[in-house]
Amino acid sequence: MNRSLFFIVLTFIFIAIDWYVWQALKVVIRSSSPTVQRWVSGLYWGFTGITLISYILIQFAPPDMFGRATRSFVLSGIAIPYFAKIFAVIFLLVDDVRRLVQWIISLFVPSVAGAPADPQVPRIPRSEFMSQAALVAGGSLFGTFAFGILSGAHDYRIRRVKVPLKNLPSAFHGMRIAQLSDIHSGSFFNRTAVKGGVEMLLKEKPDLALFTGDLVNDKAEEVKDYIEIFGKVKAPLGVYSVLGNHDYGEYVNWASIDAKRQNLQNLMKAHGTMGWRLLLDEHVPIQVDGEEIGLIGIQNWGMGGFPKYGNLAKAHQGTEKYPVKLLLSHDPSHWNAQVTSQYKDIDVAFAGHTHGMQFGVEIGGFQWSPVQYRYKQWGGLYEQDDQYLYVNRGFGYLGYPGRVGILPEITIVELVKA
């Protein structure tokens, strides 16, 4: 299906959804005054018209007409209302199936329809209760996603975990590691809130700070306005970082290969400008009071079609002397694919990537997100045969400029001697 035909078909689907939901709204307001009905009609179709016009504009506007953050807001402004309407449609379909069954029965037993026997087919009215339920359900979903933008996007949370390690040198007992991941600076719309998140991290006074990839969405220039803010991230033992799948500019139609390479070089330079030590398939020692552990960092390596630039064998070589090894690898799928099977001496791996899909439920020990059907390890601490993986839920957001249930995270991992 070519792009124009797809656009036409999807537009008609949108209009059909709008009309279907309008039938329910008419049922709910039918006992209201004509003035109220006119106002409701005007507001509903006015908002719908704005949504459809926005959809048309975003489809035909030049790619560089909107920035990434603006485009995300416009697309969310289109998607959220229609997700809400589709949710309402589910309730309406239940009611219409009921009406259809009742109508078929009424052809043979007219009294079932609540009308006397008559040669004419009786009319089965739409249920006002189901119409109200559909509108409440759709409105609730719309409100939830809107709140996720207004509040959830920058509702930073400190998550603290302790990781017991048998071979941890005594000098490292109680060492606090701060982890950030998935900043996606090209999506930010509230610079003040981002600064507040960094200040939360600094108040924790970590000994070591780690960043596990996706500094930008696509282009190095996205981080320009945030270098000063993230450059404030400091720790006595240093700040170390790796690249994520978005950092390579894989999702942009570059004018040339050279332009793509230059973008990556600029991004790497940004890490250095902020004072972050970018690890590219290598390891470094972390020393405290004459004792040391190894920190390994690789480029992105992921399953499911994501880039496999990282070379863990290269980075791991020469780490035999370290009693404890920590690994920075952006994609958590790397842990089971290589680490737990081939590198059993890696004690703790730090990852991000999933964002917890920016949607889900976390209450007490209960966790659920749709992303768990794609990633076995998607948020929090995991353990397998004395090896640990911590998956950070991300500091930023991508696509949908908000978060519902799965809030942005700053992790504080404390290493303790088992």
Image (cartoon, helix red, strand yellow):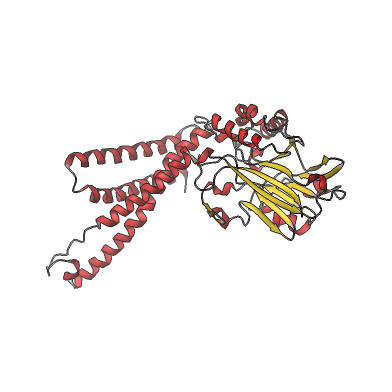
Q: Position of residue 387 (x, y in %)?
A: 74, 56
Residue at 86% in and 47% down = 318
- The residue nearer to you, when weighing 60 against 354, is 354
- The quadrant of the picture occupied by the C terminus is bottom right
Is 106 displayed left or right of 187 in the figure? Answer: left
Is 219 displayed left or right of 1 in the figure? Answer: right
- The residue nearer to you, when weighing 291 against 121, is 291
Q: Position of residue 290 (x, y in %)?
A: 87, 41
Q: Does 4 sit above or below residue 258? A: below
Q: Position of residue 336 (x, y in %)?
A: 70, 57
Is 170 displayed left or right of 213 in the figure? Answer: right
| Res 98 → quadrant | bottom left
Answer whether residue 175 is visible to the viewer in this image. yes
Is 290 displayed left or right of 349 in the figure? Answer: right
Q: Does 130 sit above or below residue 276? A: below
| Res 384 → quadrant | bottom right
Q: Does 65 sit above or below residue 112? A: above
Residue at 52% in and 34% down = 69
Q: Position of residue 233 (x, y in %)?
A: 68, 33
Name, please, the residue furthest toward the bottom.
Answer: 108
Answer whether residue 4 is visible to the viewer in this image. no
- Number of marks in the rendered image: 0
| Res 243 → quadrant | top right
